Structure formats: structure tokens, C-alpha cells
Image (cartoon, rainbow, N blue to C red):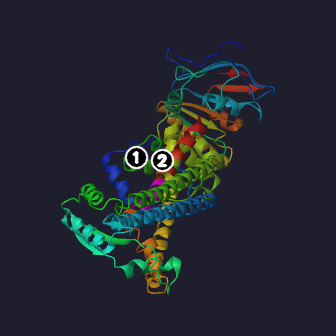
Amino acid sequence: MGQPSPPPRPSAPVAAEQETALPATLRRNAPLVPTDSAASRALAAVIAILTFLAALCAGAAEIVASSANQWQGSVAQEVTIQVRPSAGRDIDADVARAEALAKATAGIATTRVFSKAEAERLLEPWLGSGLDLSDLPVPRLVTLKLAESPLPDLKGLRGSLSEALPGVASLDDHALWLQRLSTMANTFVGIGIGIVALVLIATGLAVIFATRGAMAGNREVVEVLHFVGANDDFIARAFQRRFFRLGLRGGIIGSCLALAVFALAGLLAQVWRSGPAGDEIEALFGAFHIGWRGYAAVLLIGVIASVVTGIVSRLTVRRFLR
Amino acid sequence: MTGDSLLSGVEEPVVQFENVGMRYGLGPEVLSDVSFQIAPRSFQFLTGPSGAGKTTLLRLILLSVRPTRGLVSVFGEEVSDISNEALTGLRRRMGIVFQDFRLLDHLTTYENVALPLRVQGRAETSYRAEVVELLRWVGLGERMHVLPPLLSGGEKQRAAIARALIARPDLLLADEPTGNVDPGLGRRLLRLFIELNRLGTSVLIATHDFALMDLVDAPRLVLGQGRLQIEP
């Protein structure tokens, strides 16, 4: 060094000259909190696993919700008239009368009368085949497909049925079935949301412990930052940035794994659909496709996990420094 | 001890201690009834045998510990009830060279020296030229991309000094700044501090190197058994 000249007073030309002389590889703005440690990798893995589980729950809830919607849609498009046999009445005439009434009602697209043989066949799963059911008072069904417009007047049809065929014909609009289906689907979605919330809380708690560990492990860094004039907010932001990055890494890995699982499940479902149990699988899960809403939910969970990680670490640091 | 003063004129002292006592926990008093002032633009040594309380006194000025009794004022502000924001403001007016350097091992020499400016929220481009120029001035121009574990003792020392100087502090505290370097480099570093003092910074150097102190005609704050004496 020799005899020192006065400390440097940078000027614009000097600055430009120095800037060009800087080594190209000089690292100038590395994170203030060391990022690459075993604890960091462990935390990223925990966040990835938790995000993966939460995303699976969200995707499963979405599958149930959309399948239930499909079932509800198809069930709600159809109503049934049931015509019961009654002593002293001609059931075929009653069925024809009920169908005529239905056809005369606005908003009914098509009608289909189940023949006696068809009605008996519906009982086969319970009574077995090969029985003579002619002596049994098997009710007859007329299914009605509802039109998109005009809106069907089911109340009017119910009224005219009970007027024309009192105690014999009744209209079933599947309301009870739809309500149960909707309750079941909502329960599944509610459970899914609950599990996602629990997983996010678990993520937050894991981050609190990890942040406290990181604060203890970086006590000297924090002390030096204080001595060189950093305030608590600056230090909290440094930790928040570090944990947000970890959270983002974990969240992206977890979400991508979940998306891969759903894509794989979709492929497997396609393969199984051609097999013997295919109809049942398709009836239960539809196409096993989580749709754009499902994909958005999975990605959103990854983002939320990162944001939760960042915010929780910042709050923890602020508390710790106080 | 009565209020010994290094204050010239009527300017507000940079540091003022009044009957300050300090003990750690329930242990004995490390400092007893210490009173002194540091004037703006003054230069002084703090000396005494090992364990006399030099580092504790520096930590009191640096506000990393609070006195058990007595009053400590820094830049005219009494520090017993100081808020965190005000504390940060005071620390930004100080530069500190630690005995063990306290460089952050995961940051390059450049990043370590730039730290006081970075924590003020300044953009890297706004201080780049300043940092590079100071690094070259202390002879670390070729070592700015190196991590501290790869620096020699003398290089670490100069990096720590550069970090203390970069924000042009009003007060420079140095704890055994020549303790880890050969006498030649020690003298060169001392000249650096004198130059800084000429430019208006108050300097307090803690050392027990009498040969070094003999090189400069400056008052000495002498600590012994927790008490302070001032040798003009």
C-alpha cells in the first residue's frame, strides 16, 4: 500500500473506467443469508412433499366435484313417471294416458315408455332371471327427457297426473337423489379444502422451526448485518427472500409431481377403460381428468405454499429479533 | 473519576460516557465509573492489558450491550431507551473493525466491503465504482472476487477496514486492528486511520501495541481493573 493517498472520491469518468475494468465473473449481489445448506434442502423437500399431498387432495376433490356435476347434469335432464298397477284398472291405458299428458306438457323433449318386459328386467339384479313376474304388481315407467327451452312445467305435469290418474301415477324429478349427490360431492370438496388448509398450516409450522434454526445458525451473519447498519426489516426481508425461494422450489417440485401423477392416472384410466372394469371406472371418475380448474388449483397450491413460507419466515424473524 | 474530556471547543461530543458501570450477569464489574468524551474529528487510542475491558467499552459505544449503570450518549443521543430505528441510524454513522474481522464467509470480498451501502438499500450500480476504488486503494483490487476463507490474515484485515470505511463514517472504532499483521503492515494501516481522521472522522483504536501507539501523538484512554485514565 505504501503511503496512502486520500481516500477515493469517485467521479463519473472514474466510475465508468472502473466499471469496464471489473471482472466479468465478479459476484456482486449474492443472498445475504447463506442458502445452500443441508437444512435448506431438507426444508425444500418437506415443502415439496406437503405441496404434493395438498395438490393431490385438491385434484381428487376437483375430480369428485366435476364427476358429481356430470352425474347431476345427466340425472337432472331426466324425470320419470311411475304408473302403479291398480285393481280394476287397465295399466296399459294408464301408461298411455300418462305419456299423452307428458307430451302435452311444454318443455318435454321426448318420452319413452318402458314396456312390461323392460320394467321386469329392471328387477333382475334383485330377483334373478328366469322368474315369471306376471303375477307381481310391477310398476311401469315412462322416462321424460327435458328440453333446454322452454323450461319444463313439472309442477303442472304433476298436477295434471294426480288429477287424471289419482293414486296411480306419480312424477319423480330425482330431487332427493340430486340433493344427496350434491351433499356427498360438497362433503368431499370440503374435506379436500380442509386437508389442503391443514397441509398449509403444517408447512407454516415447519417453516417457523426452520427459520428459528436458520436464525440460530446465522447468528453471526445477523450480528454483522446489525453492526453495519441493517435494520430489522432489512434482515427479515433477507430471510424472507431466502425462504420464499426455498418455498418456491419445494412448491414447484411438489406441484409438478402432483401434475405428473394426475397425467399418469389419466393415461392408466384410458388403458383400464378398455378393460372389463372400464365402465365402472368411467362412471365413478369420468375421464379421470382434473380439467383446467384442477391444474390451476394444483399450481395455486404451489404458489400459496411459497408465499406462506415467505410470510411466515418474515414474521418469525421479526419476532426473533424483537 | 471526574469527567475527563477529550473535547475541544463547544462541539457536541461524538461519544460521552458518564459514570458508566458494566457487568455481565451477576459477575464482577468489568467497567467501573468510566467517564470520558470523544470529540468530533479526534484521534485516540484505547489501551490496557488483556481482559481490562477494552472490547466491552467498544461494544458499549457500538450499542451492542447496554450499561448496567451510568449514561452513554452517542452522537448526542442518550442510548438507554433508544428505539431500533434510531439505533440503526447511529450505527450507520459508525465504522467498526473487529478483532476477528467478522467478514461473512459466503460473500466475496467485494460484497463484504459493499455491505454497509447495500443494507442502506442502495442499488449495486450506485456504489460499484466507489467500492472498487476503495478495494484498489487498500490493495485488494485483484482479490475482490475471493471469498474470505481464501484471504490471508492481512488481506482480511484490509477488507474489514475497507468495510468500515466505505460508508464514510463519523466515528471509526477499531479493535486490535494491527493484531494479526506484521509490524510493517500495522504501520501502514495506522497511516490509513490517520488519513481518515484528517478527513474528519473521529477514530478510536483499541490496542495493546505500545510500539504502534508511540508512532502517533494522540491521547490514550488507559483501562486497568475496570477503571479508565486518560493520558494526554
Q: Let me know if residue B191 is in the magenta part.
A: no
Q: Chain of mark 1?
A: B
A194 sits to left or right of B225? left
> In which quadrant is the N terminus of chain B drawn?
top right
Measure how far apart labels 2 and 1 are at the Cα level.
8 Å
> In which quadrant is the C terminus of chain B drawn?
top right
Q: Is residue A298 visible?
A: yes
The crowding category of the residue bearing disc 1, from other C-alpha atoms within 10 Å (few below 14, some 14 to 19, many at least 20), is some
Check contact, mark 2 vs mark 1: CB within 8 A: yes
Q: Amino acid at mark 2?
A: Ala
Which residue matches tag 1?
Answer: B127
Camera-nearest residue between B80 and A195: A195
The residue that appears at 47% across and 30% down in the rendered structure is: B200
The answer to whether A140 is drawn above or below residue A186 in the figure is below
The residue that appears at 54% across and 55% down in the rendered structure is: A195
Q: Quadrant of residue A144?
A: bottom left
Query: Which of the labelled discs sits on residue B114, or is there none?
Result: 2
Q: Quadrant of residue A151?
A: bottom left
Camera-nearest residue between A27 and B196: A27
Q: Amino acid at mark 1?
A: Tyr
Magenta segment boundaries in residue numbering: A296-304
Q: Chain of mark 2?
A: B
The crowding category of the residue bearing disc 2, from other C-alpha atoms within 10 Å (few below 14, some 14 to 19, many at least 20), is many
Give the image location of residue B12, x and y in percent.
Answer: 51, 18
The answer to whether B67 is drawn above or below residue A228 in the figure is above
Q: Magenta region, mostly helix, strand or loop?
A: helix
Give the image location of residue B59, x and y in percent.
Answer: 65, 32
* Secondary structure at numbered mark 1: helix
Residue at the extreme front = A88
First along the sequence among labels 2 and 1: 2
Q: Let me know if residue A298 is in the magenta part.
A: yes
Give the image location of residue B68, x and y in percent.
Answer: 71, 22
